[in-house]
Amino acid sequence: MATLPSVSYSITVRLELDAGGSAVGSLTNAVEQVGGMITALDVAAAGHERIRIDVTCAARDTEHAQAIVDALGGVEGVVVHKVSDRTFLMHLGGKIEMKSKVPLRNRDELSMAYTPGVARVSQAIAANKDDARRLTIKRNSVAVVTDGSAVLGLGNIGPEAAMPVMEGKAALFKRFADIDAWPIALDTQDVDEIVRTVQLIAPGFGGINLEDISAPRCFEVEARLRELLDVPVFHDDQHGTAIVVLAALRNALRVVNKKLSEVRIAMSGAGAAGTAILKLLMHAGARDVIVSDVHGAVHTGRENLDSNLRWIAENTNPQGYSGDLKGSVAGADVFIGVSAPNVLSGEDIAEMNEDSIIFALANPDPEVDPEVAHLHAGVVATGRSDYPNQINNVLVFPGFFRGLLDAQSHHVTSDMMVAAAEALADVVTEDELGPNYIIPSVFHSDLSHHVATAVREVAQRGQAE
């Protein structure tokens, strides 16, 4: 599958050339000849004899970016002065900061914000710890916690390398739900140490968002923290993905006029995301599911099953299918992949039932080429931004936590997740719904509000019972 130029590999090249020459007109042609795309061309300085021009281009990857620079430098009369990687420039010094919400213009204001006035507030909280949600940033703060063991598709790259991703997550929390989120990168991958560290810092936060912690450790970390803490704990790689998948599948089934309780689902991937998707789909009404991993279908007769795979075997695959992924896909209505690239072909998709649904979510290369899948399926979704129906966690986690914080919830439940999925799906109106629009844009103005409202209502009902 060919990769198109992307703003993720956007560069700005400062060039100097003759003011009266024909080189300017050759720049676009030079970039296009090597498969790049010019997105902006600005004159930085002009003189009678020479001018400086900033050319901004989108490339496929770093090697392609260098090929674009070489092509520009090869234009007669052009001198390359400087090349800037726009993505790295955005990250210089980090992407988030802390700001004071109160003025500190004089001694009176300082005395209330800090000593001696602040002592009165501290004494009130000491007398009633719940007041911390009302009188501190706890009421609107989330810790984004990682150990750097499963960062994006990069693997175990460590806590320092995970920080740009955690900062980005924090920025998304603020942009889409006005939540103050704080990146916490832990220099340990020991389950006991992670759990204990998060337990120790939890008093300062209204919620814990676990991020990019590899399976199977992430299951134990989340389960233990949920038992220990009085604030909600949410593993976005598991549950954020699951909620968006359920929302998208709900609408995809509407497009092809099928019901969740009646369709046969073939899944590829039994890790953190795959297991969470499976459990939420079953909680929402799915009945006939076969899950496959690198060793084939998960079934009760398979040897060497860990506790997670044992649960899957005991709760899915009622017919005891023991073949490979391709065999499980034949005759299925839905395929959901959270595994590896190119594990299926167009011929495999053609063996599925009519009006099949394909969610090929491996990134950047899906389980099946989306262009090929479209030839045989009724609805196709991926994790990529350059195809319709992108399954992206940012659609849900800001609003989900907004609802939790507003309700001052202490827990996350499956009912909350189903409600969030239904609210997310309902943002797409009947007039808008179609094969290429089953999930709204992350920039939809009502998205976060709808999800937050649904989660808050479920949380408040639980508190009242």
Image: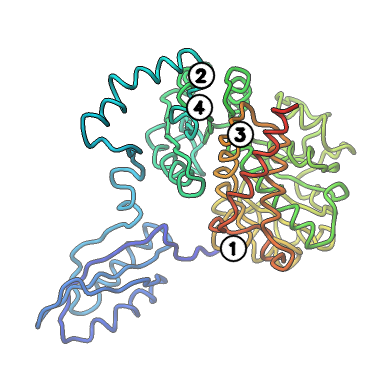
Count of numbered circles on the image: 4
Q: Residues within 10 Å of mark 2 (few under 14, many from 20)?
A: some
Instruction: Tell me what residue is drawn at x 55 percent, y 58 percent.
Output: 445
Instruction: Tell me what residue is drawn at x 66 percent, y 51 percent.
Output: 424
Place of residue 246 in the rendered image (x, y in percent of width and height, measured from the top left):
71, 47
Label at residue 136: none
* Residue type of the residue flagged with mark 4: Arg
Q: Which residue is mark 4?
A: 133
Question: Between disc 3 and disc 1, whose residue precedes?
Answer: 1
- Quarter of the image that includes the N terminus: bottom right
Q: Which residue is mark 2?
A: 199
Badge nearest the viewer, 3 or 2: 3
Taking the view exactly as shown, the residue that stands out farthest to the front is 108
- Quarter of the image that includes the C terminus: top right
Can you tell which quarter of the image residue 384 is in?
bottom right
CA–CA distance between discs 3 and 2? 21 Å
